[in-house]
Amino acid sequence: MSDNTRETEIVTPAADAAPAATVVVDGLAPATTTEGIVPDVRDVPAALDQDAPAAPARRGLRAMLPRRSGKLTAGIVLVVGILLFTFVAPFFTQDPRSTANARFLPPSAEHLLGTNHIGNDIFAQVAYGGQGSLMVGLIAGAIALVLSIVFGIVAGYRGRFTDEALSLVTNIMLVIPGLPLIIVISAYLQTRSLVIVAVILGLTAWPGAAIVLRMQAKSLRARDYVSAARVAGEKTPRIILVEIFPNLLPLLTAQFLGAVLLAILAEAGLSFLGLGPSGSITWGTILNQASANNALSLGMWWWFVPPGLLIALFGCGLALINFSLDEIINPRLRLGPAAVKSVRKARKAGLAVDADPDGAGSGADGNDPDGTDTDADDAKETVGA
């Protein structure tokens, strides 16, 4: 008897779960809901998926490049523009060390930014000084990048004693305050060239990046393709360079740009305090001369505004490029805007269906054309079963 009853028993299937893309986000209430054993979700018209073109997949090297955006374009324009000014303008100016001009001249056609306290052309010094600041930034950024790779990627992949030893050095350098250490070292040296200042800045700028790279390397070490390379007998240097290093290129690029920016700002700060490169022309040394000769009280804005403005614009450009690289490193930043945009399009399409005068098809409220709420009926039958 029970077998016959079991054979004739009718089981109503449960309501289908809504796709994840239709879940309400962005803090806005949905236009309609579907009640049942599944959470309340948004009913998205099927025509939306048919009309929306699929975005082409980015593969290979293109997948590691930032997508074109407003901040990336603005950052590249700022950085390239300042680089062109720094390396092209010196060919059309006089010697930045020439003292043949009169002192404290205001801006004119002959001297676009006037002259300083010893007759140097300020425009020539600003154009030429950018090369020194960029040289310090690039050297310091390269040193910081190499040290962060050694103390980060190598320590994270090797593990055990190597990881403990390298992490100990990293933690010691991390707790030492960088700016006081730089000031003490710079004050101790009698002669400070651009290279020496860059080396000092590079040796104190790597611990933070090394910790991030160490955590990423420990995560990549557990991946299947890295394990397969170890089983195949690949040596450690090749695994690091071929299997791990390419996956960290966006992060390494972002860290290099950040190190260059911090080095340029640190050099400007040291030069402003009188601890910058000796006998060299940089944007920081120009600010130091303007401060020492009371350019602000004399109203000589053309002496300190241009170098300070170039430092700010160049730093802004590098920061904008760095933000674009963050979209590759952080999947939430890369996929979040597209997901929110698709949900907003779904809401607009749902509102358009609500305004359909014919009432044909399934409306945004989930009802059939004959006015019966099939979703609610199915949910009731499911709960009853």
Image: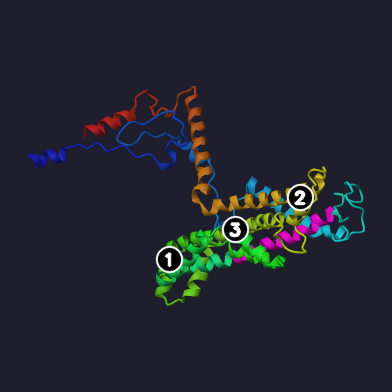
Helix, strand, or loop for circle 2? helix
Residue 180, which numbered label?
3
Inter-mark Cα distance, 2 to 1: 52 Å
What amino acid is found at the position of numbered circle 1 in the picture?
Arg
Q: Which residue is mark 2?
A: 291
What's drawn in magenta, residue-wise? 122-143
State left or right for residue 196 relative to residue 348. right
Q: Position of residue 242 (x, y in %)?
A: 51, 70
Q: Earlier in the sequence, mark 2 or mark 3?
A: 3
State left or right for residue 167 relative to residue 276. left
Location of residue 250 with respect to 34 vertically, above or below: below
> Between tags 2 and 1, which lies in front?
2
> Between tags 1 and 3, which lies in front?
3
Residue in the picture at 49% in, 28% down: 351
Location of residue 90 with respect to 333 vertically, above or below: below
Residue 221, which numbered label?
1
